[in-house]
Image (tube, grey):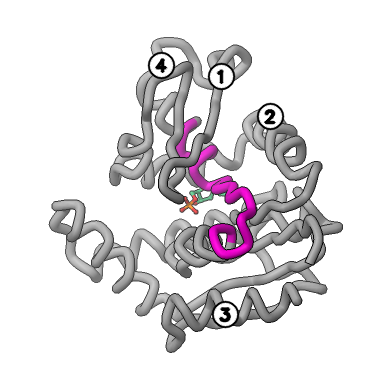
Amino acid sequence: MKNLVIAIDGPAGAGKSTVAQLVAQKLQYLYIDTGAMYRAVAYLALNSEENFLTAIDNIKLSLTYEDGKTKVFLDDKNITDDIRTPEVTKLVSSVAQEPKVREKLIDIQRDLAKNGKVVMDGRDICTNVLPNADVKIFLTASIKERARRRWLELSQKGYSIEEEKIQEDIAKRDKMDMEREIAPLKQAHDAILLDTTSLSIDEAVAEIIKLCQ
Ligand code: DC
């Protein structure tokens, strides 16, 4: 197995980041969470005094890895936890529709993947960012299961939100991500569909490792 580029797309809450992170750890590859980059720009939009479309010209966005976990820095400020708040989650899909934002982030993403040995996940990785990836996967799960997983994740962080409300928010985000004009979320024609509704994390990871061999 040499210097593969592994691309994983899928809707919110399908387990992409958990699975992609573990695949990267097993193969000793770099994991790149592109959703975290869009979230960082949404955080900027909420916190910047100037228009975020102007502010992003001069931002320094970096991802680092510690104990297998991604840390996100915006101009040297650690915003790892700040990008997961419900406020950022609510805003991120509309920020991600801005052509200028996508252009800037896609340049960074392609540069990070240029030497291979990467697992990158997002919405348009197989279709647009890395169409020549060696392994392309569309990871999904039923909306009910995705809402249940997000609820669990948020509850563990101390947020109390009803599962039904989460499901509504996910449905809204799916719709925006799938219907936007630029690089909408869709399964690439040559991507392999992996439905994780009734798979454990380890089973999903094993499936992907098998596809890499
Ligand atoms: O995977 P996530 O929930 O952290 O992603 C947050 C948002 O970022 C998602 O609603 C759409 C956007 N996104 C995107 O447009 N393109 C990507 N490659 C990754 C994420």
Q: Amino acid at mark 1?
A: Lys
Q: Amino acid at mark 3?
A: Ala
Q: Earlier in the sequence, mark 1 or mark 4?
A: 4
* Residue 174: percent from left, percent from top: 50, 62
Position of residue 61 in the picture relative to residue 7 (left or right)? left
Element type at marker 1? loop
Q: For marks 4 and 3, give the CA distance.
A: 42 Å
Q: Amino acid at mark 2?
A: Lys
Q: Earlier in the sequence, mark 1 or mark 3?
A: 1
In this rendering, the label closer to the viewer, 4 or 3: 3
Q: Are marks 1 and 4 in contact (CB under 8 Å)?
A: no
Q: Which residue is mark 2?
A: 104
Q: For marks 2 and 1, give the CA distance.
A: 11 Å
Q: For marks 1 and 4, give the CA distance.
A: 14 Å
* Residue 204: percent from left, percent from top: 53, 78
* Residue 134: percent from left, percent from top: 81, 64
- Residue at the image position 61 percent from the left and 81 percent from the top: 207
Q: Is residue 205 above or below residue 132?
A: below
Residue 31 colored magenta? yes
Q: Which residues are magenta?
A: 24-40
Name the quarter where the N terminus is drawn: bottom right
Q: Which residue is mark 3?
A: 206
For the residue with label 4, is its CB less than 8 Å from the closest atom of ligand 1? no
Q: For marks 2 and 3, give the CA distance.
A: 33 Å
Residue 57 colored magenta? no
